[in-house]
Amino acid sequence: MTKQTKSATGRSRAEDIADRLREAIHAHRLTPGAKLSEDEVGGIFEVSRTTTRAALQMLAHEQLVTIEPNRGAFVASPSIREAREVFEARALLEPRTARSAAERATPADIARLRAHIDAEHAAMRSGDSGRALMLSGAFHIQIAGIADQDTIEDFIRQLISRSSLVIALYWRRQTALCESHAHDALIEALARGDGIAAEELMSSHLVDLLSLLDLRQTPPGSLSLKDALA
């Protein structure tokens, strides 16, 4: 077995590469269906095919990448059925998790969420929709973390990851990103400790987000792999 070189933080090179690819996928610089050539990825990061393959396998485990025999690796392309299932699963988990978060949120938690939403607003104002999308997803994951339910947080993290692919494929317009007022209202409910309001707001927010997706739309084009990782 090839030994993976560890960074100063103890992470393997494959993990670092998976992080870079994951970020590019979540920011829609690499869109569903984009080819992830082992040779090209390895060349960009100056690593062996073994290390590249390990990074792609990590992303395949997260369902961000599909690996097809004799064809290689591609950014995953969720079907319409999968898209609906992702949002149905989120609708089952996230409202109740928001309620739990409201019951547990500390002033420090609220301050972190407000700083996060400021960054999200800044990204939207600057026209950086990819970064805004990543921050929107991370906001939902932070709420799950505040709820202090590790297993559910893991599920939500996976669903948010898949949602990024769904939005890349099927969004109707830029407002398919989590709109700022929805997140602002959620923060205020959490700050008040109003679990019922947080649950209702999250539920309606997810319904609104799903309604902004066009499940007949064809995928947009992707940047080149080199440009996406720049």
Image (spheres, rainbow, N blue to C red):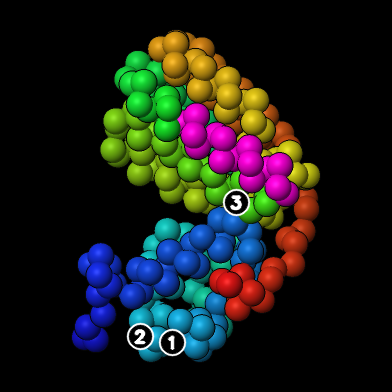
Where does label 2 land, which residue? 50
Q: Is residue 21 magenta?
A: no
Neighbour class for label 1 at 10 Å: few (<14), some, many (≥20)?
A: few
Tell me the chief SS of the magenta region: helix
Q: Amino acid at mark 1?
A: Glu
Query: Going by the image, does 158 lie left or right of 104?
Result: right
Residue 84 lies in quadrant: top right
Neighbour class for label 2 at 10 Å: few (<14), some, many (≥20)?
A: some
Answer yes or no: is residue 53 visible.
yes
In the displayed structure, 64 sits above or below 170; it is: below
- Structural distance between the alpha carbons of marks 1 and 2: 12 Å
Badge 2 element: helix
Where does label 1 land, which residue? 46
Q: Position of residue 5 (x, y in %)?
A: 26, 80
Q: How many marks?
A: 3
Residue at 38% over, 89% down: 48
- Structural distance between the alpha carbons of marks 2 and 3: 30 Å
Where does label 3 land, which residue? 131
Answer yes or no: is residue 97 visible.
no
The residue closer to the viewer here, 13 or 65, is 13
Q: Position of residue 95 (x, y in %)?
A: 48, 24
Neighbour class for label 3 at 10 Å: few (<14), some, many (≥20)?
A: many
